[in-house]
Image: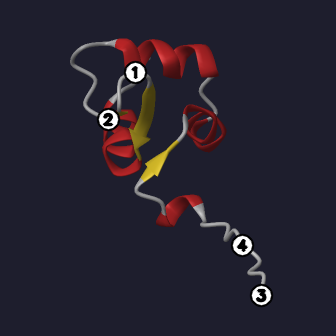
Amino acid sequence: MSMNKQTKEVPIEKKLTLTKYEAAAYSSIGINKIESMLRAPTCPFALYVGENKKLVKRKEFEEYISQKTII
């Protein structure tokens, strides 16, 4: 008996976290800028998964962006 794994695409607006690539596409901000913002020690939207993986908390990212006029 074999089971097929089905991957489901979750719309960005329903995701809790985004990869840096999804965040860049979602916001039209470049990957390098997203990465530099995630490296800041006080970044309010960074979520660390282990030592090396960083995700973007979508709601916090949206709030952060909406409060800024220059990034």
Ranked by sequence position, the earlier of labels 2 and 3 is 3
Q: What residue type is labelled 2?
A: Phe
Q: Which mark is residue 5?
A: 4
Q: What residue type is labelled 3?
A: Met
| Neighbours of disc 1 within 10 Å: few (<14), some (14-19), many (20+) | many
Residue 45, given in percent of the width and then of the height, sits at 32, 35
Q: Do the residues labelled 2 and 3 touch (CB within 8 Å)?
A: no
| Residue 44 relative to residue 27: left or right | left
| Neighbours of disc 3 within 10 Å: few (<14), some (14-19), many (20+) | few
Ranked by sequence position, the earlier of labels 1 and 4 is 4
SS assignment at label 3: loop
In this rendering, the answer to whether 16 lies above or below 53 is below
Residue 69, given in percent of the width and then of the height, sits at 40, 24
Alpha carbon of mark 1 to alpha carbon of mark 4: how far?
32 Å
Residue linked to disc 2: 45
Residue linked to disc 3: 1
Residue 19, given in percent of the width and then of the height, sits at 54, 39
Alpha carbon of mark 2 to alpha carbon of mark 4: how far?
31 Å
Residue 46, given in percent of the width and then of the height, sits at 33, 31
Residue linked to disc 1: 38
Question: Which residue is found at the position 60% from the left and 67% from the top?
Answer: 10
